[in-house]
Image (spheres, rainbow, N blue to C red):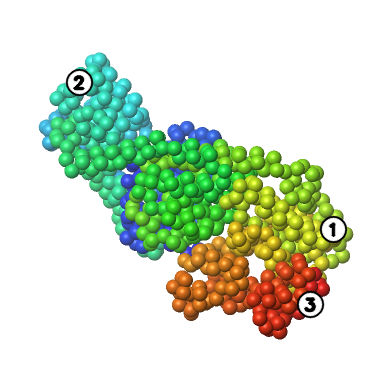
Amino acid sequence: MTEKSMIGIIAAEVNNIEQSQIVKGIIASAQSFGRRTVIFSNLYNNYEYSEALALENSIYDLVYSPQLRGIVLIQEAIINEKLRSIIYHVIEQRQDIPVVVIGLYFPALDMPNVRFIDTDDEDDIAEVVRHFLEVHQLTKIDLLTGFQGQWPSERRVAGYRRMLESHGIPYDPSRVHYGDFWVSSGISYAKRYISGELPMPEAIVCANDHMAYGLLDTFLENGIRVPQDVRVAGYEYIHERIYHTPMLSTYCRGRNQIGQNAVMMLETMAKGEPLPSFRPPKGTWISGESCGCHSNLEQLREEVERMRTKQQYEKWNVLGTQEQQLTLCSTLEEFIDVLGKHQYMIRWVQNMYLCLFENWYDTSATEPVGMLTCRSVMPWYRNRPPVTCTPTDFHALFVNAPDTANHFYVPLFFEQHIFGYYVLEYYEPDSYDDVFRNWMKTVSIGLTFLCMKNDIRYLLQCQNLSEHHDALTGVYNLQGAEKVLSVRLSSAAEPLYSIAVKFSVFQMQTRSQQTEFLTQVADVLRNFVQKDGICCRIDQQIFLCTNLPCHSMEECEMLMNRLSAVLLHSTNLLKERNMHTVLYSALKFEPNTDVKECFAQVQQKLAEETSLLAQRQSSPHTSTLYVIRNRLYETLALSADIVCKEYSFSAGYFRQIYKDCFGISFHQDTINARIYHAIYLLSTTVMSIASIAEKCGYEDYNYFLRQFQKVTGMTPGQYRKNV
């Protein structure tokens, strides 16, 4: 599904309270337009770019999804230049959709599809100064702002100056002090006031709360009374007032409203309509004791409740045993169960998905491979089959979610290896907080332990046969396949017909289970290719059977059906896994073709099959239909009446959704299931044809013969002779 229906949000360290307020506004407005939101954020947002954390910024590659209707970039969250250039490059590639940037104007983003909006720091600081001038009748007011020469700092100076001059008070540059927007600046200037280096004013306006807290704490330690000796006000409202005394008076920027404005602007741009003039939203005065006023009790109650909740979740995360339990897991199934038992540790989340690339367990891999397999970790959703999709197919995870759901994508990585993504699902406008960062570190470390433990077991169970053979199965490895296939292609007079088989069952297995299963598969494939064929394992999950006894693609596809039947019934695929965990492709390699081109053809064909599988899984009933089909092929005795009764389907509806999902009617698939079993028995046993017919559920021998010939194009006797 490629319909552009979602709004993407680009942020950094979105757990930060300021970014969270904007995100909530975006989500609320998007929901009012019937849009879903997908949020992309890294976990770490250092002032200096860290190469050790560079891999997490691959999260922004998801912005290339064709399903996005528009993008909101929270630019103020991007605090280092290198990360900013990475994100700007992504935005530059998305000139096909509207983009709204919340933050300062940057020439690098000045493109036809980009609009800039922001709150007005100048107006906001002017309102703080107005409060001291008009409510408290003060005139000796200092300003502590950020870095000198930077736009946000100077805008706040401009608001301070404008309000003073509008009240007839001359602007005095000596009352403006430049800092770094951090607590350290507040501490430093408080000491200068206390020592007498700077004359103590009547009031100090701080250009953010962090600097205000530095002032308050240092004044308190040194006996300076606030507000009796000096009054203090902050700016930003970062929800940490209860940790400091007196309670800080501050100003909350219109962050929620700016988020809502961004969505309204996106919708207007997407429709091609003229944009209305933009007016920055006004903020809100947050009353406290530090300016000489009194706190709003209802507002204070909400803050205290919020902080108590945060402390409770922090306590669960710090004192819980999840980390130890994860490192003891031996299988991914156990790992997900542990996550599910501890899901309560993430505040108010409705669903969580562990999304892993096909090669997540290969710690030597430098690049992620293939599709994502996404599993809900919530205990009440554990019976749902995993969702297989491309990383940018956001619809795949929304299939079972309410219309109001929104998803946060967070990178899951350890050092230079990326496992995939962790996805949080919320129904209300909300976002995760700082505690979730600890959760992600725990999950990453746990997955790394799981990889290491299974690598050791795998190595202990394998024998090194030769450099050209796969150590586990004994068939040709990639290097051996390249060598032997090159010789065959260069000497062949006719095309080489081949069958590629891809298994996607390994993510839920230990290495021991993988070894047992792959050994079974290798035995089947070696017998299948016979003496002139080549059997090789060219990838962790892909086997290739080539130089098969075929003279056309039709014959090759017939062989592929036989191989499918044998694999289904001679391995534990049906009993312990699902049919859809195996994909097949019939291929033809022309003589003198470069062997690397052949392998590229294999990868492309299987990628197409994987994509088709992912499309099928987007149906709301896919998980149920897979269970039904697997059961049908295992028992050979499932009827449509039984299915409709068990799952409360009407007969007509069931027939329709089954055919839509698998491209074949349930009735015809029932016949195929029986004939596939007959093919397996004809290929691997000496049972009589009459006995095989009875074994496959046919009471009428002649009817079985007609059905078999209709499906395979030959009689059972002819089929056995060809085998």
140 on left or right of 181: left
Q: CA distance from mark 1 to mark 2?
A: 89 Å
* Amino acid type of the residue that numbered disc 1 sits on in the rendered structure: Arg
Amino acid identity at mark 2:
Ile
Q: Are marks 3 and 2 in contact (CB under 8 Å)?
A: no
> Residue 237 occupies which quadrant of the picture?
top left
Side of 632 where 31 appears, left or right: left
Viewer-nearest of discs 1 and 2: 1
- Point out the image quarter for the C terminus: bottom right
> Which residue is located at x 61 percent, y 55 percent?
505
| Nearer to me, 199 or 478 | 478
Looking at the image, how many numbered discs can be counted on the residues? 3
Q: Distance between the Cα atoms at labels 3 and 1?
A: 33 Å
Q: Residue 184 at what x, y percent from top left?
A: 34, 25
Q: Residues within 10 Å of mark 2 (few under 14, many from 20)?
A: some
Task: Determine whether the residue tagged by mark 1 lies in a helix, strand or loop.
Answer: helix
Question: What secondary structure is found at the residue carrying circle 2?
Answer: loop
Which circle, 3 or 2, is nearer the viewer?
Answer: 3
Q: Which residue is mark 1?
A: 488
In the displayed structure, does residue 338 sit left or right of residue 541? left
Badge 2 is on which residue? Answer: 224
Q: Amino acid at mark 3?
A: Gly
Q: Residue at x 44, y 61 (%)?
A: 400
Residue 549 seen in this snapshot? yes
Residue bearing the label numbered 3: 717
Going from the N terminus, do you reach mark 3 or mark 2 first? 2
- Identified at 54% across, 42% down, the residue is 329
Q: Are marks 1 and 2 in contact (CB under 8 Å)?
A: no
Q: Is residue 694 above or below residue 532?
A: below
- Residue 431: x, y in percent? 37, 47
Give how far across and how far down residue 59 sits, in percent: 50, 47
Relative depth, front residue between 470 and 62: 470
